[in-house]
Image (cartoon, helix red, strand yellow):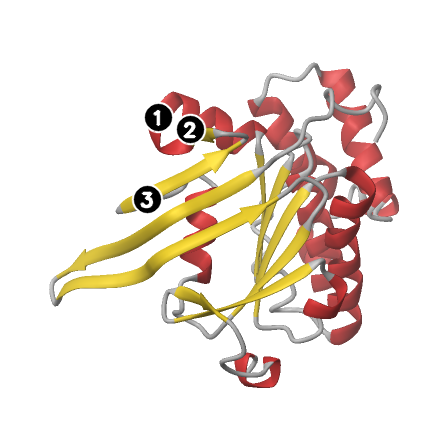
Amino acid sequence: MNSSDSPPPSQAHVKLEGVFKSYETRAGEIPVLLGVDLEVHPGEAVAIMGRSGCGKTTLLNLLGGIDHPSTGRVFYNGSDIGELSERELEDYRLMKVGFVFQLFNLIPSLTALENVTLPMILAEVEPQERHQRAMHLLELVEMADKAHKFPDELSGGEQQRIAISVALANNAPLILADEPTGNLDSKSSEIVTKWLCSLARDHGKTVLIVSHDPHIPPRVDRSLVMEDGKFEAGTFSLEEVSS
């Protein structure tokens, strides 16, 4: 992206230190994360693998400012995001973090172009710049010809590529992808994984991908396995993770 299409570039260095997370339920306290440490640098694409319920999505929610750790600290560029006010957290989620979800999270009544433009409206970007930047982002993922299509007129892979453009709308330095290939066929999964990794390698983004997909680890810079709320080494194979 060039300067005429996007805000000035920035980078994201994220870090978790001794993070524990548990939830209170009627049945008692449920531990989810058990002392997690993690550091990811700008330009790095990292996959976090593991079975359902092991804590992967909770970890992304903490990095995205959606949730708070029970104990421990979560840092963005050296600042503890747990110390941000609610207004500051809203700005953090809008401007610093781009989310990509398994179910695409596109608004059905909006076209692809309008979906990409929406975060920029919230960020009060001028209309002409919004349109130019949105079209540039659609071109980036080879979807410019689908700009005026509605989500139900697109394939799953096409919708996910639109969702990546939405995540990039405000030039967020940190991209968090939660099972981004979970509803895609193998060809679409390969395309989406390629685009996500290119955000780190070609655009300096910090990219974390939570997944069961065993085809993702060979494409990223690092692959970590999570089991029972913490990172493990050599506890089970990727084939077991995806089962």
Point out which mark residue 89 bears.
Answer: 2
Q: Is residue 184 above or below residue 161?
A: below
First-in-chain label (2 vs 3)? 3
Q: Are marks 1 and 2 in contact (CB under 8 Å)?
A: yes
Of the pair 66 and 233, the residue shown nearer to us: 233
Give how far apart the Cα atoms at labels 1 and 3 are: 19 Å
Q: Pick whichever of labels 1 and 3 is earlier in the sequence.
A: 3
Q: Position of residue 186 (x, y in %)?
A: 75, 75
Q: Residue at x 11, y 63 (%)?
A: 26
State the residue position of label 1.
86
| Type of the residue with mark 1 | Glu
Q: Which one is closest to the eye, mark 1 or mark 3? A: 3
Q: Which residue is mark 3?
A: 72
Asked whether 132 or 194 is in front, the reply is 194
Question: Where residue 37 appears, x then y in whole percent?
Answer: 44, 52
Q: Residue at x 40, y 41 (%)?
A: 66
Question: Is residue 141 found left or right of 217 in the rendered image?
Answer: right
Task: Please say if the residues under marks 2 and 3 sit with CB atoms less than 8 Å apart.
Answer: no
